[in-house]
Amino acid sequence: MDELALLVAADRRALNYTRSLPSRRVFPDAEAIDGLKRFDEPLPLNGHSAEQTLALLDEVGSPGTTASNGADYFGFVIGASLPVASAAERLMIAWDQCASGWDNSPVSATLERQAARWLLEILDLPAESAVGFGTSATACTLSCLATARRELLKRQGWDVDQDGLTGAPEIRVVVSALAHITVIKALRVLGFGLRHLLIAPVNDRGQVDVERLPELNERTILCLQAGEVNSGEFDDFEQLIPPAKASGSWVHVDGAFGLWARASSLNVLTSGIEQADSWTTDAHKWLNTPYDCAMAICRHAAALSATLRGDAVYSAAAEDAQKNLTMEFSRRPRGIPVWAALRTLGSKGVAEMVERHCRLASRVAEGLSSSGYRVLNRVVLNQVLFRADDEQQTLRICDAVQASGETWFGATQWQGKSALRISVSSWRTQDANIERLLALLDRVKQSDLAE
Ligand SMILES: *Cc1c(COP(=O)(O)O)cnc(C)c1O
């Protein structure tokens, strides 16, 4: 089969998959999972045909997917892919650009600059900020925290690039007790030492307790969050950031999904966030672009660029070349799906999507309460945290829901006990999906009580 015929075949299979999303189980059944054993074959000496490889991928692989690109998936904050973001991604794959800088791909450099400008505008963050389009919030947080440390050390007269960390002034990290595990991972990988982190206690809602914040100074990085993964709560930026800045601290905000509230009428949740030094957010979650797509945003553009500089003798580039703002040197122009999503939705479309998800989450909370569940959070955003009557029933309900194949969400821990967590973040999810979810949860609870 020639190249074009193969790509047409792949497109046809991809279209069939997309078409099948509404009727697909949300999590694969045992048979489909068992079928994945067919991938366990020896590395061929003489390769198989491309056509056969594609067929195997589709016939065995497609049934083994999680339908997180559908309307009925409520696990984590996964989002789906907007049609235009998927479409732009398809074209981008055909282009196969190495988007390190202008020299490699003028179109990528142009579009990622444009996406960065729009992003700062829609998130209402300082226009002078640099935006690195990285693989994930994890990688972008790592970039921002490395920049924070380098910059604070520089202000202390220490050149970490040349002299490293041995003998350097100590940089302290104050981090929310409910910081996402990937923030902790970034800190650990950067060598801050888990034992040395200063944990900021949180209140009952999961927000950093302003009264009990550890002391801050010019050698401190303060990590806050917009959108806690369980409760969806936001730290009180208006109370926390100005004194932190006055002390000389660097403030970083993890807004992997929550930062998008700023693009909607829920923006009051983020008041004061613009005063931070750096922010992380994902596009592959709430903006509904395909994976991997996230942003490191830094008010001090030159500092991010100096920290991540990847110029070589054979390839110098502008300060805002993406290879100087991300971990990668060779990279896909992952800002292009962001550009496509923003251009197609417009700021109004983004606001409408975010607001609809939050409204649907409130409806979930209301329905759950009527079915006798206990909702544990305020539902300020798109996250609903809840429990059944006791620990055992909560876990049984989780199992029953997952086994149904009609939807998928998972269990978590909240204040020491199991809880269930529903995130509404797919552009496809509408009122009818929520009513079906609630009917299922009601059925499952009633039949559990009957047994
Ligand atoms: C998902 C998430 C992350 C990590 O994002 P990735 O893109 O998966 O690396 C960080 N913080 C919060 C609050 C998240 O929800």
Image (cartoon, rainbow, N blue to C red):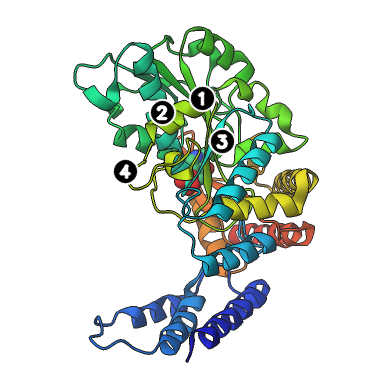
- Tag of residue 313: 4
- SS class, disc 1: loop
Disc 3 and disc 2 in contact, CB within 8 angstroms: no
Disc 2 and disc 1 in contact, CB within 8 angstroms: yes
Frontmost of labels 3 and 1 is 1
Q: How far apart are marks 4 and 1 (CA)?
A: 25 Å
Relative to 172, is 436 above or below?
below
Residue at position x 46%, y 78% in the image: 32
Q: Distance between the residues labelled 3 and 2?
A: 17 Å
Badge 3 or badge 2: first in the primary sequence: 2
**Image spot of residue 379 (x, y percent):** 68, 38
Q: In this view, does 198 lie to the left or right of 3?
A: left
User: Label 1: few (<14), some or many (≥20) within 10 Å?
Assistant: some
- Using the rendered image of the protein, determine whether residue 376 is visible from the camera's viewpoint: no
Query: Mark 3 highlights which residue?
Result: 255
- Using the rendered image of the protein, determine whether residue 115 is visible from the camera's viewpoint: yes
Frontmost of labels 2 and 4 is 4
Q: How far apart are marks 3 and 1 (CA)?
A: 18 Å
| Amino acid of disc 2 | Thr
Relative to 387, is 7 above or below?
below
Residue at position x 47%, y 92% in the image: 1
| Amino acid of disc 4 | Val
Q: Quadrant of the C terminus?
A: bottom right
